[in-house]
Image (tube, helix red, strand yellow):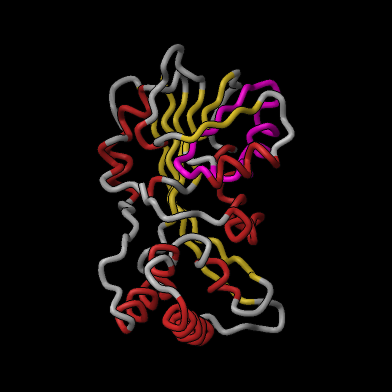
Amino acid sequence: MTSHRWDPSQYLRYGDERTRPFLDLLARVPGDARTVVDLGCGPGNDVGPLRARWPEATIHGVDSSAEMIERARADVDDPRATFEVGDAAAWRPGGDRPDVIVSNAMYQWVERHIDLLPATADGAGRAFAFQVPGNQDAPSHALLATVAAEFGVTDFRRVDVRDPAEYLAALQRPGWDVDVWETTYLHVLQGPDAVFEWISGTGARPVLARLDGAERDAFVARYKAVLNAAYPPRDFGTVLPFRRIFAVAVRR
């Protein structure tokens, strides 16, 4: 996974919009759960939806970012939720398998994560569910690459997202029922430079981390300008179409 430092406050700026796909994912996971593991748990903002879905479950979050785990431990007031710094992509149960393993917008940062999915699913006692952004071909990302190249940044880490059919093929095995789908949300973002504020907390981080000082300021000004042209603000806000890919694998 990427080693760039995460800013929990920036990530949470549009927390409701980032949480909505996770709610839709959890709604498709059948049955009850006593133990849940959240891979790539970030600043702990998934605990609320997980607690609402499974009120009696113990929840354990894993994230490679020490900043995110520090924020989760500070903000989450839930005695049945714990957090650890660790490689979420490589996580496997050390003892009994948790009933459910979930992951909310993490795997896009893991190269060739599709090879890891069967083993991760095998670590769940009953169900494995994840969602990833599928907007890597959107103007926001195409413009990021174009503007970054203008500033000499061409080798930054890009996301690895696969076609839904690939996820289905990876997870569909004897003894499992798999449901894969995609949805495009029309997020209405408020505030100036809304799309930049959104992507600077996630997809633009690898580029921003490569620049500093006046060069970084110039990049930000240029990128904001092209984003505002591609996603023009309206009276009611700025519309950001955002495609997401979902997968739920359930043991029979």
Magenta-tinted stretch: 42-66
Vertical placement of 193 versus 40: above or below?
below
Comparing 94 with 209, the one in front is 209
Rendering coords of residue 95 (x, y %): 43, 12
Rendering coords of residue 100 (x, y %): 51, 25
Residue at the right extreme?
Answer: 77
Does the segment drawn in magenta span residue 250?
no
Does the segment drawn in magenta span residue 47?
yes
Quadrant of res 10: bottom right
Vertical placement of 147 versus 91: above or below?
below
Residue occupying the point 55% across, 47% down: 67
Quadrant of res 33: top right
Q: Is residue 195 left or right of residue 137?
A: right
Quadrant placement of the C terminus: top left
Q: Is residue 206 left or right of residue 67?
A: left
Rendering coords of residue 41 (x, y %): 53, 40
Residue occupying the point 69% across, 21% down: 56
Quadrant of res 140: bottom left
